[in-house]
């Protein structure tokens, strides 16, 4: 990896549905790197209220940061515990910029320096960046590495599809146009806009679909290419093809 990655890089998973610009986050990260090489990572977070269905049990985390600098000071998973204590490095009386937040969700996107690779190489038993690497280094008395948070705006989207439940929610919201940046009928290299038609109540039908006259296509349904719908079929709340 060290022979391929020669500078700072963006680390992310392949199960992420996202539409936002990383330009400002990258600029801020590189500016911090110029001031100190100890600033090794910028984590991207999205805002999600505690009751939001776009949260999973793994997202039940509490984040302590310096709102003036964006520096991450503490990260606590609350999926298995309901209480926490601030670490010894955090003094609320001395720093009025301390912010304790429960409305931020890790997008699994990070801007990293090569020092992150060094830590992963030295600690091959790390399983996740948040639960292992970040928590370890944030509490370390040996390392002085610093982490920062970049919080997305309310209209910016970054969702990690980690389980069937989240897959269903994201798919449903795309079909219902609840995520307007991801319209089903958006043109792409594989499909022109005219290839799939949109009707009221979120009905999408590809122009190659064979649809019997007595078939019924209900609300929030997508029928894509290569599909044949027989007589008296009724399809609701589904994605086919």
Image (tube, grey):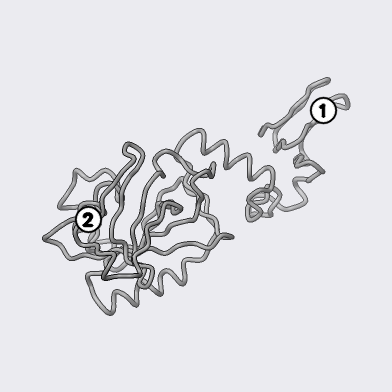
Q: Helix, strand or loop at disc 1? A: strand
Q: Is residue 228 above or below residue 200?
A: above
| Residue 109 higher or lower than 52, as above or below | below
- 115 is higher (above) or lower (below) than 225: below
Residue at 70% across / 38% down in the picture? 224
Residue at the outermost top position: 232
Relative image position of residue 121 (x, y in whole percent): 18, 52
Assign the N terminus to one quadrant of the image: bottom left
Q: Earlier in the sequence, mark 2 or mark 1?
A: 2
Q: Is residue 230 left or right of residue 160?
A: right
| 86 relative position to 208: left or right | left
Q: Residues within 10 Å of mark 1 (few under 14, many from 20)?
A: some
Q: On residue 89, which mark appears?
A: none
Residue 68's image quarter?
A: bottom left
**Which element type, helix, strand or loop, lies under badge 2?**
loop
At horizontal 26% and vertical 70% (from top left) the residue drawn is 94
Mark 1 lies on residue: 216
Q: Are marks 2 and 1 in contact (CB under 8 Å)?
A: no
**x%, y% of residue 21?**
51, 66
Q: Nearer the viewer, residue 3 or 152?
A: 152
* Separation (CA) of disc 2 from disc 1: 60 Å
Image coordinates of residue 99 in percent, x first then y, are 37, 62
**Figure quadrant of residue 59:** top left
The residue at which mark 2 appears reads as: 87
Density class for disc 2 (Cα within 10 Å; few <14, some 14-19, many ≥20) is few
């Amino acid at each position: 990896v060290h022979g391929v990655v020669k500078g700072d890089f963006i680390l992310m998973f392949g199960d992420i549905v996202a539409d936002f610009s990383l330009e400002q986050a990258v600029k801020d990260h590189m500016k911090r790197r110029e001031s100190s090489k100890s600033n090794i990572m910028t984590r991207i977070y999205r805002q999600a209220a505690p009751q939001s269905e776009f949260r999973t049990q793994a997202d039940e985390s509490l984040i302590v940061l310096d709102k003036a600098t964006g520096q991450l000071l503490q990260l606590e998973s609350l999926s298995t515990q309901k209480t926490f204590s601030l670490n010894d490095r955090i003094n609320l009386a001395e720093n009025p910029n301390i912010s304790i937040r429960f409305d931020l969700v890790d997008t699994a996107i990070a801007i990293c320096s090569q020092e992150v690779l060094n830590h992963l190489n030295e600690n091959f038993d790390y399983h996740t960046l948040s639960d292992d690497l970040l928590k370890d280094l944030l509490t370390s008395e040996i390392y002085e590495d610093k982490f920062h948070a970049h919080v997305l705006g309310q209209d910016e989207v970054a969702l990690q599809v980690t389980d069937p439940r989240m897959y269903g929610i994201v798919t449903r919201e795309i079909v219902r146009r609840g995520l307007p940046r991801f319209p089903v009928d958006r043109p792409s290299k594989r499909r022109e806009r005219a290839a799939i038609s949109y009707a009221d109540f979120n009905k999408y039908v590809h122009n190659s679909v064979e649809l019997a006259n007595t078939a019924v296509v209900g609300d929030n349904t997508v029928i894509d290419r290569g599909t044949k719908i027989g007589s008296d079929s009724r399809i609701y709340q589904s994605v086919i093809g």
